[in-house]
Amino acid sequence: MYSFYGTWPWYISGLLIGAVMLSLILFGKNFGMSSNLRTMCSAMGAGKTAEFFNFDWKSQRWNLTVVLGAMLGGFIATHYLSDGSGVNLNPQTVVELRQMNIDEPQGKLLPDALTSAEALQSPKILAILLLGGILVGFGTRYAGGCTSGHAISGLSNLQLPSLIAVIGFFIGGLIMSWLLLPLILN
């Protein structure tokens, strides 16, 4: 019998994602985390200062359940469905991270080299995080959605722009992780 501790098998996650996507298609809805951020900003009054946020956010209230579900699901998975081992990386990945002066996660989601209180006092680390956040925000807006929206919702609807965006995400991730990140951190 399968234990809920550790990594869930791909077929359970795949089945759940497929069921959610099928229900969204049946109800004529689209999925994406960046649209949730837009809805939250609009609800908090951002439409008064930026035209992008000036829309009927109340028609998108249902989408905020995605954010709530992600937070609640993460809490339940971490506290009740996990064996506490956290993130386990491939040993070769750990070696490559050490070469860039990034500590082994030891079950944590984020490395201390980038997110500890000491690291956040470094202007270089702050600049990396700030520039990365701006680029992700710009890229999400420029691509018309985020990775989850394009890769899950767009591809399941057979949208060519989503396929192009996902290919771009992967190419960008490869360039960043194999070429730019080692240059930046060394």
Image (tube, rainbow, N blue to C red):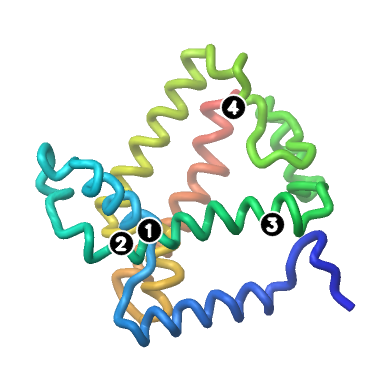
Q: Which residue is mark 1?
A: 64
Residue at disc 1, secondary structure: helix
Q: Nearer the viewer, mark 2 or mark 3?
A: 2
* Image quarter of the N terminus: bottom right
Name the residue: 80% across, 59% down: 6
Residue 67 in percent (x, y) is at 45, 55
Q: Quadrant of residue 14?
A: bottom right
Q: Which residue is mark 4?
A: 115
Which three-letter amino acid code belongs to the residue tagged 3?
A: Ala
Residue closest to the eye, 45 or 36: 45
Residue at disc 2, secondary structure: helix
Crowd class of label 2 (few under 14; some 14 to 19; many from 20; radius 10 Å): some
Circle 3/circle 4 CB separation < 8 Å: no
Residue at disc 4, secondary structure: helix
Which three-letter amino acid code belongs to the residue tagged 1?
A: Leu
In the image, which disc is placed on residue 61? 2
Q: Which residue is mark 3?
A: 77
